[in-house]
Image (cartoon, rainbow, N blue to C red):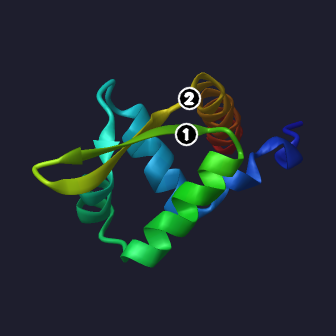
Amino acid sequence: MIDFSKLDKTIHEKGRLSIMTLLASRVEPWSFQDLKGELEMSDGNLITHLRTLGTAGYLDSEKFTGDGRPQTLYWLSAPGRKAFEDYLAILEQILNMGR
């Protein structure tokens, strides 16, 4: 039987799952503006989810000034990538059980 309590609640929320999926989808970091545009989230909503994921240790970020404007880049940390892979493995078990 699948232990549904092992689903990471930090990742499982729709907005954070979307962020984690995008960050896992490529090696290069995502800028705040690119994440915002891709996910169609407000600044406040996106930053709240990014902070939650950062507090959990799932993200790394770097702030810099590019083109005279401050920017922040985000990418999955090693623990974040592992947590996401574990999350996907549990989802796969759930899918296989339902087939």
Residue 31 percent location from the top left of the image: 29, 48
Badge 2: residue crowd in 10 Å (few <14, some 14–19, many ≥20): some
Image position of 16 with respect to 25: above or below: below
Q: Do the residues labelled 1 and 2 touch (CB within 8 Å)?
A: yes
Nearer the observer, 69 or 40: 69
Disc 2 is placed on an element classified as: loop
Residue located 66% across and 37% down the image: 87
Residue located 29% across and 28% down the image: 28
Task: Give the alpha-carbon distance from disc 1 to disc 2, as whole Å.
Answer: 5 Å
Q: What residue type is labelled 2?
A: Ser
Query: In the image as oriented, which residue stretches furthest toward the left?
Result: 67
Image position of 20 with respect to 27: above or below: below
- In the rendered image, the quadrant that contains the C terminus is top right
Dividing the picture into quadrants, the one containing residue 26 is top left
Residue located 67% across and 39% down the image: 57
Which of disc 2 and disc 1 is earlier in sequence? 1
Q: Which mark is residue 59?
A: 1
Image position of 48 with respect to 32: above or below: below
Q: What residue type is labelled 1?
A: Leu
Disc 1 is placed on an element classified as: strand
Q: Residue 16 carries which label?
A: none
Nearer the observer, 45 or 20: 45
The total number of labels drawn is 2
> Is residue 51 rendered to the left or right of residue 24?
right
Whether residue 11 is visible here, answered yes or no, is no
Badge 1: residue crowd in 10 Å (few <14, some 14–19, many ≥20): many
Whether residue 20 is visible here, answered yes or no, is yes
> Is residue 90 rendered to the left or right of residue 16?
right
Nearer the observer, 38 or 98: 38
Q: Residue 77 carries which label?
A: 2
Residue 24 percent location from the top left of the image: 43, 33
Dividing the picture into quadrants, the one containing residue 75 is top left
